[in-house]
Amino acid sequence: MFEILKALPADPILGLSAAFKADTNAKKIDLGVGVYKDEQGNTPVLKAVKQAELAYFNSESSKVYIGPPGAAGANTLLQNLIFGASHPAVTSTRVRTIQTPGGCGSLRVAAEFIKKANPPATIWVSDPTWANHIPLLGNAGLTIKTYPYYDATTRAVNFNAMMETLGTVGKGDLVLLHGCCHNPCGADLNREQWQAITELALKNGFTPFIDMAYQGFGEGLDEDAYGVRLMAEKVPELIVSSSCSKNFGLYRERAGGLSIVYQSAADADKGQSNLLSVVRGIYSMPPNHGSAIVETILASTELTNMWHDELAEMRNRIKALRALLNQKLIEKGAQQDFGFIEHQSGMFSFLGINKDQVQQLVQNYSIYLVDSSRINIAGISQANVDYLAESIVAVLKK
Ligand code: PMP
């Protein structure tokens, strides 16, 4: 039967990585794949993670199943990290958090759960959004529609257009928002905008669904959770998918969480039984190791402090590189304003150059980025920023 299958085109980002590896140009720069990199271009294991792993390795006494929701202790600590331990939704036990295989696992379980509660639901996603949102949510059978978000001319959120479209969304449908550090555009909602969307959700009855894959990469752990915490306080129902891939650097361990805020503790109990039945039908139980590391860190003041310092280092490096790239582009004579790069947030921004110019950067300068011109800021370094800025200015002049 499998002979009828047609080969699918290779994933553009993975293809880019392979081409980067094969390139022998000593000046090559990889701005494609979305992982954090240090000044040397490495993605090392965080020190807090290594220490937690050693402690966990020595204390682990059984490999018995952890059950569909994952470990209770890990879930409580993750919930507190996202919402804050004293948040009214937490203290009134309206939130349930389960451990999931990364943020992707969380998104997929959430989609199946929505499908169970309301099969004809439409989920509205930003234009643009992270490409994998479409299969993760759409393959569960939800209808996907887009709302305007990033304006390529102003290089900022087109909030009026966004609100106009969201004004047509009603009860039973969902609006997917990026909690912080928007992937791919880097343009985030400000506090007034979060408040306005919250009011609109209350007025029109749609359910917000926040994907928070980069908590701590924007302004700080609490600051980045502003939208989640505001909505969890005001709206009756909210879904939050979270990932420990970036902020704990646990990418391959597949650690994440799914938190659902219900209207009441009684609804939460009913909802949780349905959510766990979805989990049983997909992967039965989540992997343990990554979440056990997160739990070990968050349960220890010493390791938590160490992790906070390492997270701040990653965040500050990204911010400094944003400012540096803008400054170098000015120095090298860029005619257009790249100030937006400095003011955007998280690992990604669109350079805002066309496909042809992207191809020139890849082919003539060994600077690897995807066709949309999205760049991973963490791929920049003190050592390559001059060459990068010169090359961008050169392709813009042609
Ligand atoms: N959401 C967004 C917006 C992301 O960028 C990512 C990672 N690239 C994820 C979710 C999921 O991450 P993971 O499954 O690796 O935890």
Image (spheres, helix red, strand yellow):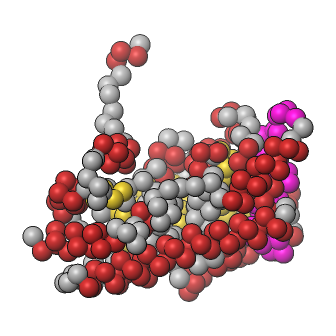
> Residue at left 81%, top 55%?
296
Relative depth, front residue between 173 and 332: 332
In the picture provided, is 375 more to the left or to the right than 251? left
Q: Position of residue 288 (x, y in %)?
A: 75, 42
In the picture provided, is 361 more to the left or to the right than 22? left
Quadrant containing the C terminus is bottom left
Q: Position of residue 125 (x, y in %)?
A: 47, 61
> Residue at left 70%, top 71%?
308
Q: Which residues are magenta?
A: 62-87
Q: Position of residue 262 (x, y in %)?
A: 76, 61
Q: Position of residue 41 (x, y in %)?
A: 45, 59
> Residue at left 34%, top 67%?
384
Q: Is residue 335 above or below residue 387?
A: below
Relative depth, front residue between 349 and 278: 349
Is residue 332 visible in the rendered image? The answer is yes
Residue 149 is a magenta residue: no
Q: Is residue 7 above or below residue 370?
A: above
Residue 86 is a magenta residue: yes
Quadrant containing the N terminus is top left
In the picture provided, is 390 more to the left or to the right than 214? left
